[in-house]
Amino acid sequence: MGEIAGVRRKFVKAAMDAPFLTREDEHALAVRWKDEKDEDALHRLAAAHMRLVIAIAARFRHYGLPMADLIQEGHVGLLEAGARFEPDREVRFSTYATWWIRASIQDYILRNWSIVRGGTSSAQKALFFNLRRLRARMAQAAGSDGLVDIQQQIATAVGVSRADVAVMEARLSGSDMSLNAPLGDSEDSSARMDFLIDTAPLPDETVGEAIDSERRVKWLRSALTVLSDRELNILRARRLSEDSATLESLGDRLGISKERVRQIESRAMEKLRRALLESHPNVGAALA
């Protein structure tokens, strides 16, 4: 561990000792990389801005992730900025690279801060990284006025719902807990998972329901044979289709009034009920 820490210190010292680039030198290196793909030019451009990476990474150290990892991810963003930089736009590379460095570090934090992925939208990402600062600022502005809804103010400022703010506050207030962790100190203590309630049906209930469903489908298909073609078409359109047809639309299709359609449907349902009662007295009444 001491050897690794020594390497890290040397890396940081080398980054801090790297010479600053003038605007002209910076532009020349960027042009060499863009036009000639000179990797040495990209390396020199990146090395001169590693102190910027370290400075930005230091702003995110309170999220509990290793500083070395934050610097490494920032370096990835720095190289991405170098690959995309347009020297002819007359913008300093540090200004352009800052966004890419910060974005790379923030993405790394969101992926590793918790096993539950957060910040899936730009608004959620802004909420994650600005919640503490916004709450402190708004609480100070509110003073002793207890009626001020700080959560709603934060939601309005960031562009999310009040529920999103409440959920994010709950997530930031504590670390992840394993469901396999014991509740007590002894090895025989129950785990948190043992107290989770599964609302899904039991396997025997699932199998039983599947068998009963297949049986009811067979009974219904058998009973439908007692209907005439027109009765069957109306019943399928009105009762056996996901998009139930209206009486009026069926009347227009069949060339009869909607009241006549209703009468045929009612008669078909009665015939179907009688057929089921005759063959299966215990279940046929359910269609009444």
Image (cartoon, rainbow, N blue to C red):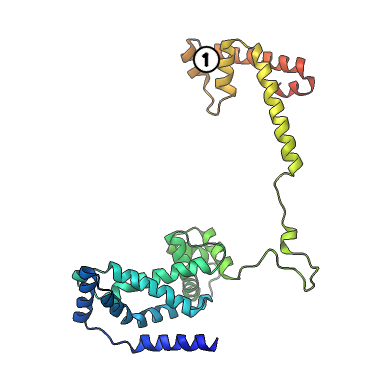
Query: Position of 266 compared to 14: left or right?
Result: right
Snapshot quadrant of residue 90: bottom left
Q: Residue at x 23, y 77 (%)?
A: 29
Judging from the image, what secondary structure is the residue with disc 1 in?
helix
Snapshot quadrant of residue 94: bottom left
- Give the amino acid at mark 1: Lys
Q: Is residue 192 above or below residue 233?
A: below
Q: Residue at x 20, y 76 (%)?
A: 27
Judge by depth and name the residue closer to the eye, 32 or 282.
32
Which quadrant of the figure contains the N terminus?
A: bottom right
Q: Residue at x 18, y 69 (%)?
A: 88
Which percent across, then down, holds residue 84? Answer: 28, 67
Query: Position of 269 compared to 35: left or right?
Result: right
Which percent across, then down, holds residue 16? Answer: 36, 87
Which percent across, then down, holds residue 71? Answer: 43, 78
Q: Is residue 149 visible?
A: no
Which residue carries the number 1 mark?
A: 258
Judge by depth and name the residue closer to the eye, 158 or 148.
158
Judge by depth and name the residue closer to the eye, 252 or 195.
195
Q: Is residue 223 visible?
A: yes
Q: How many numbered circles does the render carry?
A: 1
